[in-house]
Amino acid sequence: MNIFGRIFFRLYPNKPKPTDTYEGDDLRFVIKVCCILHALFFLASIVAIGFVSMLQDIFYACWTYSVFLTLKEWQVLFYIVTLFFGSCHGIFRLFQYSELNLLFFILKLIYYCCALYFVVRAYRNFRVTGGIHGKLGRQKPRPEGSTADRETDSGDKKKKKKKKSSVEDKLGQITEKLLDQATTMLQDDEEKGPKH
């Protein structure tokens, strides 16, 4: 597989990475909303704002989808930094637009500021609790068949095997004693001869 394919599948895996805390789910939800809104602003940029704004929003939509799937911290930080610089760039370009374009552009800047606030807040909670597998956050109940359950299940299975093998050993010993007693009784009966 070539290098670009490997990079692509690292950024866009088949399934979202599972989280162990509700803070991870909160960050994923905020990123999901941002991804949807970036896609909508991409469409609005095609119609009303302009080409540069359209490219910016399609980049944000693709990047937030990657963050949604992986929840890698460096990607979240990169998104926060680029969103900050995007909103600063937008403030400096604010007066280049005319009436309808200006309205959409102002809405987009308000959205960028709100997204920045909510993503930073969700990321801070996510980071303080230990990240994707944080032990300090609100832990989600583990689904059946998770790795922790499998470890305890394998431990339980080993214990059951030990118990089962010890029970089988005892049964084997008892059956040997019974067979020995039965063979001695048969031998005694044969020595005595037939009963009349």
Image: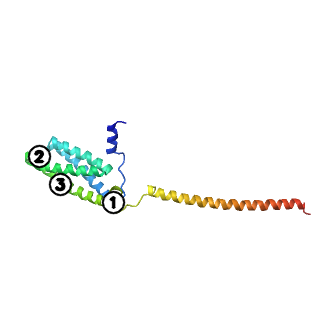
Horizontal relation, residue 82 to residue 134: left or right? left
* Residue 33 x %, y %: 26, 53
Q: Secondary structure at mark 2?
A: helix
Coloured how? rainbow
Quarter in which the C terminus is drawn? bottom right
Q: At 26% from the left edge and 59% from the top edge, which residue is drawn? A: 124
**Can residue 36 be seen?**
no
Q: Position of residue 11 (x, y in %)?
A: 31, 45
In the rendered image, which residue does mark 3 sit on? 113
Q: Is residue 105 left or right of residue 159?
A: left
From the image, tell me which residue sits under label 2.
Answer: 101
Position of residue 92 relative to residue 182, above or below, is: above
Cβ atoms at labels 3 and 2 below 8 Å apart: no
Residue at disc 3, secondary structure: helix
User: According to the image, label 1 marks what residue?
Assistant: 22
- Does 93 sit left or right of 1 as displayed? left
Q: Amino acid at mark 2?
A: Asn
Residue 171 seen anywhere in this rendered image of the structure: yes
